[in-house]
Image (tube, grey):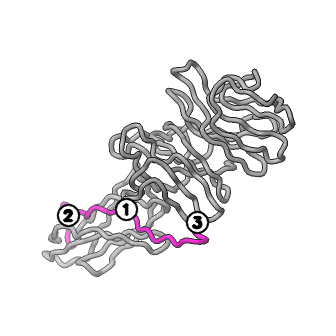
Amino acid sequence: MGPTADRGVHALVLSPDGSRVIVGGNFNKLNGNPPHGLGAVYTNATGTSAPWATGVDYISDARGSWVTDLVTDNDTVYASANGQGTFDGRLALDPADGTRRWIDNCQGATQAISLLDGILYSGSHAHDCSSQPDGFPSIVPQHPHQRLLAEPAKPTDDTPAILHWFPNTNGGPTTYNQGPRALDNNGNYLWVGGDFTTVNRKAQQGLTRFGSLTVEKDINPPQPIAKPQASKPDNSTGTLKVDWTQTWDRDNRKLKYEVIRDGSTVIHTIEAESNFWDPRPMTFADTGLTSGSSHTYSIRAADPFANRIRSSESAPAIAG
C-alpha cells in the first residue's frame, strides 16, 4: 500500500539525495500525520512517512493555505502557497526534516515557482511585499498587482529581498484569472504560462519567456518619463530651475538622467536609483544664462545597457 493524503495533492518533488518525495497540497494529514499542506515520504515500496516539521497555515476551510508548487536545488526545497486570508508567499525548507530556512510573506497568491542561476522566480498576483527587504507596499489602484517576482534562493537573512526584476502580465480576461500559473526554465530561458493576455502591456496570450543575459541582450528602455517643468527662481539672475520626476526600469534599479537644453545640448548628468512604487522628484539649476533668454528642456533617461527614453520638451521659460 502506498502513501495516502486525506485531501488534495498539488505538487511533488524528489529530495536532492533521492531518498524522499516531498509532497505539497491542501491535505491536513499525509499517511495520517500532520502538518497541513506539506510532508515527505520515503521512496521505498510502502511510501512510509519521513520526518517533517513545517506546514502552511490552516485555521479553517474558509481560512487556510495550500501548497501550489515545489522545486529543489542541491540542498533546499522551495514551496509556493495560495491562501485565503493567510500565508500565500514562498518558503525554503531543509529536505531532510522540513525545518524552515526562510519565509517570504508577500501578499498575493503564488501559483508557481522556478529556480534559475540561484534566483527563485515566482508567478503570483502579489499586491503587498512590504514585509520583504526592497519590497513594494500596497499601491492600489495605481499598480495593483506585480505578477512576476524574483528573490535570492540563498538570502543572508531569514527572509529574502525582492530583486529588481519587474516584468509583468495582466490577470487575464476575467476577474477569476490569476495571470501566471506555470513556470519552468532550461537554464537560459524562463518560461511563463497562464491566463494572461498581455506581457509588459503588449498583447501576448498564455505563454511567454524571458532570457538570461547570457543568451539575450537587454534592449528594453526605461518606462516613459513625463516632461519636465522649467521656471525662474525668485530673485534669481541668469538661472532657470528644471524639475522632473524619476522614471523606472523593469530590470535596472539605477538610471542615468541627462538634462537637455533647447533640444540638443546636454547640460547636466546624474545617476539615481528608482522603483515603480516610489518615483521621486529631481531638480537642476541651469545657471549662467543670458538674462531675458528663453529656453526649453527635456530629460533623457538611460539604463546601464544604453537603452534610452526621452521626455517631451518643457514649456519655454525666460531667464531673469
Q: Does the segment drawn in magenta span residue 17? A: no
Residue drawn at the location 60% of the way across and 38% of the way down: 68
Tell us which disc is closer to us: 1 or 2: 1
The residue closer to the viewer here, 232 or 141, is 141
Please name the residue that numbered disc 2 is placed on: 231
Outermost residue to the top: 60
Query: Identity of the amino acid at label 1?
Result: Gln
Few, some or many residues within 10 Å of mark 2 (<14, 14–19, 20+):
some
Q: Relative to residue 26, is residue 73 drawn left or right?
A: right
Residue drawn at the location 83% of the way across and 36% of the way down: 42
The residue closer to the viewer here, 303 or 26, is 26
Please name the residue that numbered disc 3 is placed on: 212
How many labels, in total? 3
Region of the chain picked out in magenta, as a range: 213-239
Task: Report x, y in % for residue 220.
Answer: 43, 68
Query: Identity of the amino acid at label 2?
Result: Ser
Outermost residue to the left: 292
Q: CA distance from mark 1 to mark 3?
A: 20 Å
Task: Report x, y in % for residue 299.
Answer: 31, 69
In the rendered image of this protein, does residue 231 appear above or below residue 169? below
Residue drawn at the location 56% of the way across and 45% of the way down: 133
Sequence order check, earlier mark of 1 and 2? 1
Residue drawn at the location 36% of the way across and 45% of the way down: 173
Task: Report x, y in % for residue 171.
Answer: 41, 45
Please name the residue that numbered disc 1 is placed on: 223
Q: Relative to residue 89, is residue 276 drawn left or right?
A: left
Query: Residue 285 lies in what quarter of the image?
Result: bottom left
Quadrant containing the C terminus in the rendered view: bottom left
